[in-house]
Image (cartoon, rainbow, N blue to C red):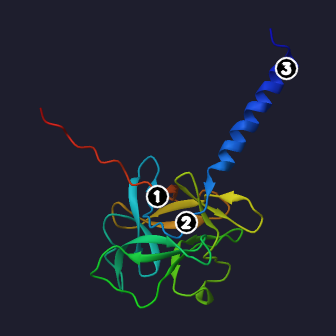
Amino acid sequence: MFSKSSFLSAILIGLEIVSAAAIGSVKRQTTDTTFGLYAYNKNISGLPVFYGDGIAYIGNAPPVNLTYESVNVTFTPQTSDSSTWAAKPNTTDVTWSTTPFLYINPTSGAFDSVGFVNSTSDLPTGATASGFLFYGQSVMYQGSSGSMDAKFWAEPTDQKDLWVLKWNSDGTSQGQSVPVVIKSTPPTTITRMMN
């Protein structure tokens, strides 16, 4: 029989092993990797994150009121800083003269759109284009404090099945917005097998 103290010791050792395994699954993307991003929650089943006039959207159809362009994008970590992710069009029909970078505003109290910026000198006040990493397949942000956060939220638009991707620094409820997990894993496609 286990004594109470040996049982607690066994649990603590188990938690340390789980914690070590979890820390081991944190990784920076390598620079030779290109990936898409997809949003998940109970009502958003792996819809892609895409570019629309410098803002990150979630959905399969672009907003009808865009001024410039909307395009599906893939991301590539930069050689100089793998926590900075450059976006590029996922089509040959669109070419960009500069490469935009994904950014968030992690400032306390901020509930701002995730966006794209062509130069870090053009970042909005409080925003950053670095600190992105994967925890398994899920996107996280790691700031200067070293803590990892995943405070992505989806704010519905007036258009059905279209959301603006937001960073909710405080993680508090914001109107009709819902928390989402952003992953590099596309949704599973189920095919029907005929006999």
Q: Quick one: SS at disc 2?
A: loop
In x, y percent, where is residue 43?
41, 49
The residue wearing badge 1 is 184
**Residue under numbered circle 3:** 6
Going from N to C along the chain, the mark reached first, 1 or 2, is 2
Q: Is residue 65 left or right of residue 152?
A: left
Q: Residues within 10 Å of mark 3 (few under 14, many from 20)?
A: few
Q: Residues within 10 Å of mark 1 (few under 14, many from 20)?
A: many
Quadrant hosting residue 17: top right
- Can you tell which of label 3 and label 2 is closer to the viewer? 2
Q: Which mark is residue 24?
A: none
Query: Mark 3 or mark 2: which comes first in sequence?
Result: 3
Q: Residue at x 57, y 76 (%)?
A: 79
The residue pinned by badge 2 equals 30
User: Which kind of residue does numbered mark 2 sit on?
Assistant: Thr
Dot 1 falls on a residue whose secondary structure is loop
Q: CA distance from mark 3 to mark 2?
A: 42 Å
Amino acid type, callout 3: Ser
C-alpha span from label 1 to label 2: 14 Å
